[in-house]
Each structure stands twice: as structure tokens, then as C-alpha cells.
Amino acid sequence: MRKLFTLLGVTLAVSLFNVTTYAAEAKEGEKAVTEEELVPAKEPLVVKYTPIAPSPAKVSVKALADVFKDAGLLSVPLQEQNKAFPNGGGSIKSVSIRAFHDGAYIYFLLEWVDAAQDTIVLISPTDTIGGGFRDSVALMFPIGKYAVIDVAHPFSPRMGDRDKPVNLWHWKADWEKDLIAGGLVDIASAYPAMHDDFASDEYILAIRNTLYKSVSYVSGGVAAGNIFSLPKTRSVEDLNAIGFGTLTTQDHQDVAGNGIWEGGSWHVLITRPLITSDTNDVQFIPGGDTVFNVAVWDGANGDKDGQKSISLSWHPIRIEMVKYE
Ligand code: CA
């Protein structure tokens, strides 16, 4: 037994050494930010002030379609994420972004061409069902007062940096599907061809239909309060990051959304109050400005995590003043 432990120890040590060596190499070559990236794009996204009647129904792409026709518009070119391992993405060439605010909430509409809607998170591209991971889109904002064009303290437009945290809003097609299903898609409807050993055993069925249908009993994730296991109440996750590999979900989820796939494109609405009580959130002050960045994942292309289509620079965003008439 001692020999086995020793062997394991050696194996572990070798593995750790390899990981350390690799991480050091990856960090050197991949994390550097070019000076070009630190200069924001010139064209701003103008967030017009457009008062609309407050209603829960306004968290809907369809309900706000007419309002968005007059909203500020910016088309953002995208490319492969090529700096942090694992690289990937690049199949989505651009995303169009419209935005307005009503004095209380800010609304973004993100639209991009995608031939197929991918709404299941865990199917690998080599599997035949679905054929990919889930589609998603994220907006990213610096928190607090920023100085993007500050050569002494450059601010990466990728995932933030140490002492320069960012707030990310990540809409996900699978969360949208859960939301439509009333919180969670039932596993039997997600995987209709799945084999069930106990489906014909009446005794076990009786137990399953009572005790085992208790999600809180059978799911450790739910018991632990894991946001991925809990029934969904929104389709957008509110997150923070301070660089690659630091993405963290927030305790205070403030962002809502609605995404529909129609005519070979995704149309995703993301909305949040202009101001929140969360110190980890970006705050939008009418009359003020900040910058944002965007990333799109194409599930059918195998996109997940760092494998995504990204914009290489910050984009200015100007929030119009509230107008009183
Ligand atoms: Ca928040």
C-alpha cells in the first residue's frame, strides 16, 4: 500500500510540475494585451432616453420590437478568442446592438446570425443529438470610474484585470429554455430517448414518483443553493471577473433577459435597473458614459467558456439624459 501511495505521489508531483510549466508558458505568450486593444473603438453606442410604460411584459423581445426600431445602433465585428487557452470561436462574424433606457431600466437588444438554435448545454459536438453546446451572449462593463486609455495602468478589454474588475451579463439559451419550462427543463423531455432501468418496475416507480421526484432530496446542487441547479427565474447570469479564469457568479442577481431564435438569427434582450444596490455591479447614470465589450458563443461550432467570438476593443457607450417635458 505504501508503494502505491509513493507511486501516486510521484505521479501527482509530475502532473503538478507539468501543469505549472504549462501555465507559466501560457501566461507569458497569451495574456499580453497589445496597445491597440487598449484604445476603445471610436463609434459609441448611444443609449437614448425613451420613456415606456413600466410593466413586467417589457422584458420581452416582441413587446419591445417597435421601441428598439428607434434605438441607438452599433454593429460590432467579432473574431476568434485567441489569447487565453483554450482558444476558439470566430464563427460569428458580427453582432448588432441596440439600446435605450426609460429612466429606470436600461435595455439592450443583441442580434446575430446563427443558422441553428442550440439550447442544450452538455451535448458535445461529436454527439448526434443537437450537435453542439448552447448558444449564448455576454456583455461586459468595467466597474466604477475607469481609465481605459491609461498607458501606465492598461485596462484589458478581455476579462478585466487585477484591481480592475468587470461586471458581466451572460444570457444563455439553455437558461431561457429552463425559464420557458417553468424553471427547469425536465430531464425526460431534454433527453426523450434516454433509457430508464426502472420505468417498468411498479415498486420502484412508486418510490420515485414520491420521494425521488423531490428535487431538493435528490439534487445536491439544489441543496447547496448552486445557481446552475436551482430552477431558473431569469435567463441572464450576473457575474464578475478580474482576469482570465476568475469568472464568479454574484450573490446579487440583477439582470433579466429574453431570447428568441427567428429567421436564422438570435434576438436577445438584456435589461437591468440603471442603478442597483450591489457594489459589484456597473452603474449607469443618465448623462454619463462608460465602455462595454461583447462575446458570442455558437454552440454548434463547439463554443464554450473561452472558445467564443469576441470583440478586441472596448466600445464607448453614452447614456442620454432624462428629458422632462
Ligand atoms: Ca448584481
Image (cartoon, rainbow, N blue to C red):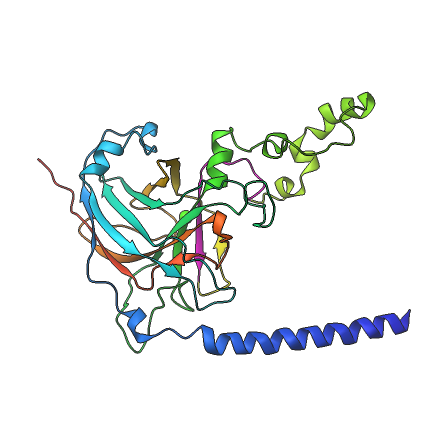
Q: Which residue is drawn at the image coordinates 65% and 35% (left, top)?
A: 216
Name the spot of residue 109 as percent of width and height, x first.
30, 42
Relative vertical location of residue 10 with respect to residue 269 in this rendering, above or below: below
Q: Which residue is drawn at the image coordinates 34% and 69% (left, top)?
A: 155
Name the dominant secondary structure of the magenta segment. Answer: loop
250 horizontally vs 264: left or right? right
Relative vertical location of residue 267 with respect to residue 148 in this rendering, above or below: above
Q: Quadrant of residue 69?
A: top left
Residue 90 sits inside the magenta stretch: no
Relative vertical location of residue 241 with respect to residue 285 in this rendering, above or below: below
188 horizontally vs 130: left or right? right
Name the spot of residue 123 as percent of width and height, x first.
58, 45
Relative vertical location of residue 13 with respect to residue 223 in this rendering, above or below: below
Q: Which residue is drawn at the image coordinates 34% and 74% (left, top)?
A: 34
Q: Which residues are magenta?
A: 227-241
Residue 236 sits inside the magenta stretch: yes
Name the spot of residue 66 as percent of width and height, x first.
22, 32
Whether residue 280 is visible here, answered yes or no, is no
In the foreground, 93 or 108: 93
Q: Quadrant of residue 48?
A: top left
Q: Among all residues in the image, which is located at the extreme right?
A: 1
